[in-house]
Image: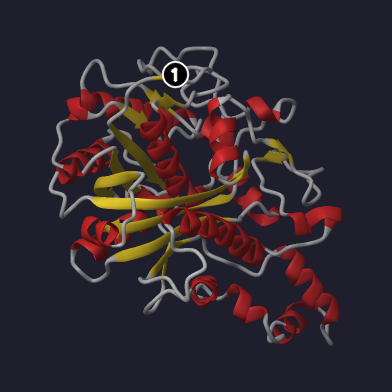
Amino acid sequence: MSQQRAIAVTGIGLVTPLGFGVVDSWAALLAGKSGVRPITRFATDNLKTRFAASVMLPEESGGRFVSAADRLHSYAGMAAEEALAMAGLGGRAGFPGPLVLGMPPIEVELTDRLALLARANTPGYAGLASASVEPGLADRTLMMAAPARLAARFGTRGAPISLTTACATGVTAIQVAMEAIRFGEADCVLCISAESSIQTEALIRFSLLQALSTRNDSPETASRPFDATRDGFVMAEGAACLVLESAAHAKARGAKPMGWVLGGGEFADGFHRTRANPDGSTIVTAMQRALDDAGIAPGQVDYINAHGTSTPENDKMESAGIHTVFGATPPPVSSNKSSIGHSISASGAIEAVFSLLTIRDGMMPPTINYGTPDPAIALDVVPNVARAAKVQRALSNSFGFGGQNSCLVLGAEP
Protein backbone atom coordinates (compact mmCIF):
# COMPACT_ATOMS: atom_id res chain seq x y z
CA MET A 1 0.00 0.00 0.00
CA SER A 2 1.31 3.40 -0.99
CA GLN A 3 1.53 5.80 1.94
CA GLN A 4 -0.04 8.41 -0.33
CA ARG A 5 -3.23 6.31 -0.53
CA ALA A 6 -3.35 5.02 3.05
CA ILE A 7 -5.39 7.23 5.37
CA ALA A 8 -4.21 7.90 8.91
CA VAL A 9 -6.67 7.53 11.79
CA THR A 10 -5.56 9.97 14.48
CA GLY A 11 -8.64 9.99 16.69
CA ILE A 12 -11.57 7.71 17.51
CA GLY A 13 -14.71 8.09 19.60
CA LEU A 14 -17.55 5.74 20.54
CA VAL A 15 -21.01 5.73 22.03
CA THR A 16 -22.40 2.18 22.21
CA PRO A 17 -24.91 0.16 24.23
CA LEU A 18 -21.88 -1.05 26.22
CA GLY A 19 -20.83 2.40 27.39
CA PHE A 20 -19.94 6.00 26.68
CA GLY A 21 -16.43 6.23 25.24
CA VAL A 22 -13.81 3.96 23.71
CA VAL A 23 -12.37 2.62 26.98
CA ASP A 24 -15.64 1.39 28.48
CA SER A 25 -17.09 0.08 25.20
CA TRP A 26 -13.93 -1.82 24.26
CA ALA A 27 -13.45 -3.35 27.70
CA ALA A 28 -17.05 -4.56 27.82
CA LEU A 29 -16.83 -5.98 24.29
CA LEU A 30 -13.68 -7.97 25.14
CA ALA A 31 -15.31 -9.19 28.35
CA GLY A 32 -18.18 -10.66 26.33
CA LYS A 33 -20.87 -8.45 27.85
CA SER A 34 -24.20 -7.78 26.17
CA GLY A 35 -25.74 -4.34 25.73
CA VAL A 36 -29.17 -5.74 24.83
CA ARG A 37 -31.97 -5.11 27.30
CA PRO A 38 -35.77 -4.70 27.52
CA ILE A 39 -37.07 -1.45 26.02
CA THR A 40 -38.21 1.11 28.59
CA ARG A 41 -38.36 4.17 26.32
CA PHE A 42 -41.90 3.41 25.14
CA ALA A 43 -44.65 0.85 25.72
CA THR A 44 -44.02 -2.53 24.04
CA ASP A 45 -46.97 -4.56 25.37
CA ASN A 46 -48.37 -5.47 21.96
CA LEU A 47 -45.10 -5.75 20.04
CA LYS A 48 -43.54 -9.02 18.91
CA THR A 49 -40.06 -7.74 19.87
CA ARG A 50 -39.77 -5.91 23.18
CA PHE A 51 -36.02 -5.41 23.53
CA ALA A 52 -33.14 -3.59 21.84
CA ALA A 53 -29.56 -2.43 22.39
CA SER A 54 -30.42 1.11 23.36
CA VAL A 55 -28.25 3.95 24.64
CA MET A 56 -29.96 5.89 27.40
CA LEU A 57 -28.93 9.51 27.67
CA PRO A 58 -28.84 11.22 31.07
CA GLU A 59 -31.55 13.61 29.89
CA GLU A 60 -33.89 10.63 29.27
CA SER A 61 -34.01 9.77 32.98
CA GLY A 62 -37.43 9.95 34.56
CA GLY A 63 -39.16 9.01 31.31
CA ARG A 64 -38.56 12.34 29.59
CA PHE A 65 -39.10 12.14 25.82
CA VAL A 66 -36.03 12.92 23.71
CA SER A 67 -36.65 12.90 19.97
CA ALA A 68 -34.64 10.67 17.66
CA ALA A 69 -33.18 13.79 16.02
CA ASP A 70 -31.93 15.16 19.34
CA ARG A 71 -30.55 11.79 20.41
CA LEU A 72 -28.70 11.52 17.09
CA HIS A 73 -27.03 14.88 17.73
CA SER A 74 -26.09 13.87 21.28
CA TYR A 75 -24.57 10.53 20.28
CA ALA A 76 -22.67 12.06 17.35
CA GLY A 77 -21.43 14.99 19.42
CA MET A 78 -20.11 12.82 22.24
CA ALA A 79 -18.25 10.52 19.84
CA ALA A 80 -16.78 13.52 18.00
CA GLU A 81 -15.57 15.20 21.17
CA GLU A 82 -13.72 12.06 22.21
CA ALA A 83 -12.14 11.57 18.78
CA LEU A 84 -11.03 15.21 18.53
CA ALA A 85 -9.44 15.08 21.98
CA MET A 86 -7.51 11.93 21.03
CA ALA A 87 -6.37 13.54 17.77
CA GLY A 88 -5.17 16.65 19.60
CA LEU A 89 -7.73 18.81 17.80
CA GLY A 90 -10.15 19.45 20.64
CA GLY A 91 -10.67 22.96 21.96
CA ARG A 92 -9.53 24.55 18.72
CA ALA A 93 -11.25 27.45 17.01
CA GLY A 94 -12.42 25.00 14.36
CA PHE A 95 -11.70 21.67 12.74
CA PRO A 96 -9.35 22.12 9.75
CA GLY A 97 -11.44 20.10 7.31
CA PRO A 98 -14.98 19.10 6.31
CA LEU A 99 -17.59 16.96 8.07
CA VAL A 100 -19.03 13.73 6.66
CA LEU A 101 -22.01 12.38 8.60
CA GLY A 102 -23.57 8.97 8.09
CA MET A 103 -27.09 8.95 9.49
CA PRO A 104 -30.57 7.42 9.11
CA PRO A 105 -33.48 9.25 7.52
CA ILE A 106 -35.02 11.47 10.19
CA GLU A 107 -38.78 11.62 10.52
CA VAL A 108 -41.40 13.25 12.70
CA GLU A 109 -41.99 10.29 14.99
CA LEU A 110 -45.21 9.18 16.65
CA THR A 111 -44.73 10.99 19.96
CA ASP A 112 -44.11 14.27 18.14
CA ARG A 113 -47.12 13.77 15.87
CA LEU A 114 -49.47 13.01 18.75
CA ALA A 115 -48.27 16.13 20.55
CA LEU A 116 -48.86 18.19 17.40
CA LEU A 117 -52.34 16.74 17.00
CA ALA A 118 -53.19 17.58 20.60
CA ARG A 119 -52.31 21.22 19.88
CA ALA A 120 -54.09 21.36 16.50
CA ASN A 121 -57.15 23.58 16.03
CA THR A 122 -59.00 20.94 14.01
CA PRO A 123 -59.04 17.15 14.35
CA GLY A 124 -57.62 14.59 11.95
CA TYR A 125 -54.99 14.84 9.26
CA ALA A 126 -55.89 18.42 8.32
CA GLY A 127 -55.20 19.55 11.87
CA LEU A 128 -51.96 17.61 11.97
CA ALA A 129 -50.81 19.17 8.71
CA SER A 130 -51.59 22.68 9.91
CA ALA A 131 -49.83 22.11 13.23
CA SER A 132 -46.71 20.73 11.53
CA VAL A 133 -45.61 24.24 10.56
CA GLU A 134 -44.68 24.72 14.22
CA PRO A 135 -41.41 26.67 14.46
CA GLY A 136 -38.37 24.48 15.05
CA LEU A 137 -39.91 21.20 13.92
CA ALA A 138 -38.43 21.35 10.41
CA ASP A 139 -35.09 22.45 11.84
CA ARG A 140 -34.92 19.20 13.81
CA THR A 141 -36.16 16.82 11.15
CA LEU A 142 -34.68 18.01 7.85
CA MET A 143 -31.97 15.65 6.56
CA MET A 144 -29.37 18.45 6.61
CA ALA A 145 -30.31 19.69 10.08
CA ALA A 146 -28.06 17.24 11.93
CA PRO A 147 -24.89 17.83 9.88
CA ALA A 148 -25.47 21.59 9.93
CA ARG A 149 -25.72 21.60 13.74
CA LEU A 150 -22.62 19.44 14.09
CA ALA A 151 -20.64 21.47 11.55
CA ALA A 152 -21.44 24.65 13.48
CA ARG A 153 -20.60 23.00 16.81
CA PHE A 154 -17.15 21.79 15.71
CA GLY A 155 -16.32 24.54 13.24
CA THR A 156 -15.71 22.28 10.25
CA ARG A 157 -14.89 23.79 6.86
CA GLY A 158 -17.08 23.86 3.77
CA ALA A 159 -20.53 22.37 3.32
CA PRO A 160 -21.08 19.26 5.45
CA ILE A 161 -22.09 16.03 3.74
CA SER A 162 -24.81 13.74 5.07
CA LEU A 163 -25.51 10.34 3.56
CA THR A 164 -27.39 7.14 4.17
CA THR A 165 -26.85 3.73 2.56
CA ALA A 166 -28.79 1.58 5.01
CA CYS A 167 -26.61 -0.84 7.01
CA ALA A 168 -23.52 0.15 5.00
CA THR A 169 -23.79 3.84 5.94
CA GLY A 170 -20.91 3.91 8.42
CA VAL A 171 -18.45 2.43 5.92
CA THR A 172 -19.76 4.58 3.07
CA ALA A 173 -19.09 7.71 5.14
CA ILE A 174 -15.51 6.58 5.74
CA GLN A 175 -15.03 5.85 2.05
CA VAL A 176 -16.31 9.30 1.06
CA ALA A 177 -13.84 10.85 3.51
CA MET A 178 -11.04 8.64 2.17
CA GLU A 179 -11.63 9.74 -1.39
CA ALA A 180 -11.77 13.42 -0.43
CA ILE A 181 -8.30 13.07 1.11
CA ARG A 182 -6.91 10.91 -1.69
CA PHE A 183 -8.03 13.36 -4.37
CA GLY A 184 -6.57 16.30 -2.51
CA GLU A 185 -9.92 17.91 -1.73
CA ALA A 186 -9.15 17.83 2.02
CA ASP A 187 -6.18 17.15 4.28
CA CYS A 188 -8.35 15.83 7.08
CA VAL A 189 -12.02 14.91 7.57
CA LEU A 190 -14.23 14.64 10.65
CA CYS A 191 -16.13 11.43 9.89
CA ILE A 192 -19.11 10.59 12.12
CA SER A 193 -21.86 7.98 11.84
CA ALA A 194 -24.78 7.81 14.24
CA GLU A 195 -28.04 5.90 14.71
CA SER A 196 -31.04 6.75 16.90
CA SER A 197 -33.95 4.80 15.41
CA ILE A 198 -35.14 2.81 18.41
CA GLN A 199 -38.65 4.17 18.39
CA THR A 200 -42.07 2.59 18.00
CA GLU A 201 -42.59 2.81 14.25
CA ALA A 202 -39.08 1.70 13.28
CA LEU A 203 -39.40 -1.35 15.53
CA ILE A 204 -42.76 -2.22 13.98
CA ARG A 205 -41.41 -1.86 10.42
CA PHE A 206 -38.48 -4.20 10.99
CA SER A 207 -40.79 -6.61 12.80
CA LEU A 208 -43.14 -6.67 9.81
CA LEU A 209 -40.16 -7.59 7.65
CA GLN A 210 -39.65 -10.56 10.02
CA ALA A 211 -36.05 -9.39 10.45
CA LEU A 212 -35.96 -9.07 14.26
CA SER A 213 -35.29 -11.65 16.93
CA THR A 214 -38.29 -12.35 19.15
CA ARG A 215 -36.32 -13.89 22.04
CA ASN A 216 -38.14 -11.73 24.61
CA ASP A 217 -37.48 -14.20 27.43
CA SER A 218 -33.70 -13.71 27.14
CA PRO A 219 -32.82 -10.42 25.40
CA GLU A 220 -29.13 -10.52 26.29
CA THR A 221 -28.72 -13.77 24.34
CA ALA A 222 -30.93 -12.81 21.40
CA SER A 223 -28.14 -11.66 19.08
CA ARG A 224 -26.31 -14.88 18.19
CA PRO A 225 -24.52 -14.51 14.84
CA PHE A 226 -23.55 -17.73 13.04
CA ASP A 227 -25.29 -19.88 15.68
CA ALA A 228 -27.72 -22.45 14.29
CA THR A 229 -30.53 -21.13 16.54
CA ARG A 230 -30.29 -17.47 15.38
CA ASP A 231 -33.68 -15.95 14.64
CA GLY A 232 -33.10 -12.32 13.64
CA PHE A 233 -31.15 -9.18 14.44
CA VAL A 234 -31.45 -6.85 17.42
CA MET A 235 -31.99 -3.14 16.81
CA ALA A 236 -29.34 -0.90 18.34
CA GLU A 237 -28.13 2.68 18.42
CA GLY A 238 -24.98 4.68 19.09
CA ALA A 239 -22.25 6.51 17.21
CA ALA A 240 -18.64 6.40 16.14
CA CYS A 241 -16.27 9.13 15.00
CA LEU A 242 -12.94 8.84 13.20
CA VAL A 243 -10.56 11.71 12.54
CA LEU A 244 -9.04 10.85 9.16
CA GLU A 245 -5.95 12.57 7.77
CA SER A 246 -3.44 12.26 4.98
CA ALA A 247 -0.12 10.87 6.17
CA ALA A 248 1.57 14.15 5.30
CA HIS A 249 -0.94 16.26 7.26
CA ALA A 250 -0.69 14.04 10.34
CA LYS A 251 3.11 14.13 10.21
CA ALA A 252 3.25 17.91 9.73
CA ARG A 253 1.31 18.57 12.92
CA GLY A 254 3.08 15.86 14.91
CA ALA A 255 0.08 13.56 15.25
CA LYS A 256 0.69 9.84 15.80
CA PRO A 257 -1.79 7.63 13.92
CA MET A 258 -3.42 4.91 16.01
CA GLY A 259 -4.13 2.95 12.81
CA TRP A 260 -4.69 3.23 9.07
CA VAL A 261 -7.49 2.80 6.56
CA LEU A 262 -5.75 0.91 3.78
CA GLY A 263 -8.58 0.40 1.31
CA GLY A 264 -12.27 0.29 0.66
CA GLY A 265 -14.58 -1.49 -1.74
CA GLU A 266 -18.27 -1.36 -2.48
CA PHE A 267 -20.77 -2.95 -4.80
CA ALA A 268 -24.56 -2.60 -5.06
CA ASP A 269 -26.81 -5.21 -6.62
CA GLY A 270 -30.40 -3.91 -6.40
CA PHE A 271 -31.55 -7.53 -6.10
CA HIS A 272 -34.25 -6.94 -3.47
CA ARG A 273 -35.35 -4.22 -1.07
CA THR A 274 -33.99 -6.14 1.93
CA ARG A 275 -32.18 -9.25 0.68
CA ALA A 276 -28.84 -9.44 -1.07
CA ASN A 277 -28.36 -11.76 -4.01
CA PRO A 278 -28.28 -15.25 -2.45
CA ASP A 279 -25.41 -16.35 -4.70
CA GLY A 280 -23.17 -14.02 -2.67
CA SER A 281 -21.60 -12.48 -5.76
CA THR A 282 -22.12 -8.90 -4.65
CA ILE A 283 -20.51 -9.26 -1.24
CA VAL A 284 -17.64 -11.19 -2.82
CA THR A 285 -17.08 -8.29 -5.20
CA ALA A 286 -17.17 -5.74 -2.36
CA MET A 287 -14.62 -7.70 -0.32
CA GLN A 288 -12.34 -8.27 -3.31
CA ARG A 289 -12.48 -4.59 -4.28
CA ALA A 290 -11.45 -3.59 -0.76
CA LEU A 291 -8.47 -5.96 -0.89
CA ASP A 292 -7.51 -4.73 -4.35
CA ASP A 293 -7.75 -1.10 -3.24
CA ALA A 294 -5.49 -1.87 -0.30
CA GLY A 295 -3.07 -3.69 -2.59
CA ILE A 296 -3.05 -6.89 -0.55
CA ALA A 297 -3.89 -10.55 -1.10
CA PRO A 298 -6.51 -12.45 0.94
CA GLY A 299 -3.75 -14.32 2.77
CA GLN A 300 -2.50 -11.02 4.23
CA VAL A 301 -5.71 -10.48 6.23
CA ASP A 302 -5.43 -11.68 9.84
CA TYR A 303 -8.98 -11.09 11.05
CA ILE A 304 -12.45 -10.38 9.65
CA ASN A 305 -14.95 -8.22 11.52
CA ALA A 306 -18.10 -9.73 10.06
CA HIS A 307 -21.36 -8.00 9.22
CA GLY A 308 -22.82 -10.94 11.17
CA THR A 309 -26.34 -9.73 11.85
CA SER A 310 -27.74 -12.95 13.41
CA THR A 311 -30.32 -13.39 10.66
CA PRO A 312 -30.54 -16.87 9.14
CA GLU A 313 -29.92 -15.83 5.54
CA ASN A 314 -27.31 -13.09 6.00
CA ASP A 315 -24.92 -15.12 8.14
CA LYS A 316 -25.03 -18.11 5.80
CA MET A 317 -24.47 -15.91 2.76
CA GLU A 318 -21.60 -14.01 4.39
CA SER A 319 -19.92 -17.27 5.31
CA ALA A 320 -20.17 -18.49 1.72
CA GLY A 321 -18.78 -15.20 0.44
CA ILE A 322 -15.84 -15.31 2.86
CA HIS A 323 -14.97 -18.82 1.71
CA THR A 324 -15.13 -17.72 -1.92
CA VAL A 325 -12.60 -14.94 -1.28
CA PHE A 326 -10.39 -16.59 1.36
CA GLY A 327 -10.64 -20.27 0.50
CA ALA A 328 -11.19 -23.27 2.75
CA THR A 329 -9.41 -21.80 5.78
CA PRO A 330 -10.26 -18.11 6.15
CA PRO A 331 -8.87 -16.08 9.05
CA PRO A 332 -10.81 -15.88 12.34
CA VAL A 333 -14.16 -14.09 12.05
CA SER A 334 -16.23 -12.47 14.78
CA SER A 335 -19.32 -10.30 14.99
CA ASN A 336 -19.51 -7.29 17.31
CA LYS A 337 -23.28 -7.34 16.84
CA SER A 338 -23.51 -10.30 19.19
CA SER A 339 -22.76 -7.82 22.01
CA ILE A 340 -24.05 -4.48 20.73
CA GLY A 341 -26.82 -5.42 18.30
CA HIS A 342 -27.19 -3.87 14.87
CA SER A 343 -26.88 -0.09 14.97
CA ILE A 344 -27.84 0.22 11.27
CA SER A 345 -26.36 3.56 10.11
CA ALA A 346 -23.63 3.60 12.77
CA SER A 347 -22.68 -0.07 12.67
CA GLY A 348 -19.99 0.10 9.97
CA ALA A 349 -18.17 2.97 11.68
CA ILE A 350 -18.43 1.41 15.16
CA GLU A 351 -17.07 -1.86 13.79
CA ALA A 352 -14.26 -0.03 11.98
CA VAL A 353 -13.23 1.47 15.34
CA PHE A 354 -13.39 -1.93 17.02
CA SER A 355 -11.28 -3.38 14.18
CA LEU A 356 -8.64 -0.70 14.74
CA LEU A 357 -8.63 -1.53 18.46
CA THR A 358 -8.27 -5.23 17.60
CA ILE A 359 -5.14 -4.35 15.63
CA ARG A 360 -3.81 -1.97 18.28
CA ASP A 361 -4.24 -4.30 21.25
CA GLY A 362 -3.83 -7.71 19.58
CA MET A 363 -7.19 -8.90 20.93
CA MET A 364 -9.97 -10.38 18.80
CA PRO A 365 -13.38 -9.68 20.36
CA PRO A 366 -15.63 -12.72 20.75
CA THR A 367 -18.85 -13.70 19.06
CA ILE A 368 -20.93 -14.23 22.19
CA ASN A 369 -24.07 -16.35 22.55
CA TYR A 370 -22.53 -19.00 20.31
CA GLY A 371 -23.48 -22.51 21.39
CA THR A 372 -24.88 -24.51 18.49
CA PRO A 373 -22.69 -24.66 15.38
CA ASP A 374 -24.44 -24.32 12.04
CA PRO A 375 -23.28 -27.08 9.68
CA ALA A 376 -23.61 -24.63 6.78
CA ILE A 377 -21.13 -22.19 8.36
CA ALA A 378 -17.57 -23.46 8.62
CA LEU A 379 -15.89 -20.46 10.26
CA ASP A 380 -13.75 -19.85 13.31
CA VAL A 381 -16.06 -17.31 14.92
CA VAL A 382 -13.92 -16.67 18.04
CA PRO A 383 -16.72 -18.15 20.14
CA ASN A 384 -17.67 -16.53 23.45
CA VAL A 385 -14.16 -15.62 24.68
CA ALA A 386 -11.81 -12.92 23.36
CA ARG A 387 -8.56 -14.18 21.84
CA ALA A 388 -5.06 -12.73 21.93
CA ALA A 389 -3.52 -12.69 18.45
CA LYS A 390 -1.22 -10.56 16.35
CA VAL A 391 -3.39 -8.69 13.87
CA GLN A 392 -1.67 -6.51 11.28
CA ARG A 393 -4.61 -6.17 8.89
CA ALA A 394 -8.36 -6.60 9.31
CA LEU A 395 -11.28 -6.66 6.90
CA SER A 396 -14.51 -5.07 8.17
CA ASN A 397 -17.74 -5.95 6.33
CA SER A 398 -21.01 -4.00 6.09
CA PHE A 399 -23.82 -5.35 3.92
CA GLY A 400 -27.02 -3.33 3.80
CA PHE A 401 -30.66 -3.52 2.80
CA GLY A 402 -31.25 -2.71 -0.85
CA GLY A 403 -27.97 -4.31 -1.91
CA GLN A 404 -25.63 -1.70 -0.42
CA ASN A 405 -22.37 -3.54 0.29
CA SER A 406 -19.22 -1.85 1.59
CA CYS A 407 -15.96 -3.17 3.08
CA LEU A 408 -12.84 -1.67 4.62
CA VAL A 409 -9.29 -2.91 5.07
CA LEU A 410 -7.64 -1.50 8.19
CA GLY A 411 -4.04 -1.89 9.23
CA ALA A 412 -1.34 -1.21 11.78
CA GLU A 413 0.93 0.37 9.15
CA PRO A 414 0.43 2.10 5.77
The reply to whether residue 341 is in sight is no
Residue 256 in percent (x, y) is at 33, 49
Quadrant in which residue 136 is drawn: bottom right
Q: Say left or right for 47 vs 152.
A: right
Quadrant in which residue 160 is drawn: bottom left
Q: Foreground residue, 384 or 181?
A: 181
At numbered mark 1, what does the secondary structure look like: helix, strand or loop? strand
Count the marks: how many?
1
Q: Is residue 343 above or below residue 301?
A: below
Which corner quadrant holds the C terminus?
A: top left
Residue 299 in percent (x, y) is at 18, 25
Q: Residues within 10 Å of mark 1 (few under 14, many from 20)?
A: some
Q: Is residue 57 above or below residue 359?
A: below
Residue 95 in percent (x, y) is at 42, 70
Q: Residue at x 20, y 61 (%)?
A: 182
The reply to whether residue 377 is in sight is yes
Which corner quadrant holds the N terminus?
A: top left
Q: Say left or right for 289 vs 10.
A: left
Residue wearing tag 1: 387
Colour logic: secondary structure
Q: Residue at x 53, y 35 (%)?
A: 26
What residue type is disc 1 on?
A: Arg
Residue 34 in percent (x, y) is at 63, 30
Q: Residue at x 51, y 59 (%)?
A: 80
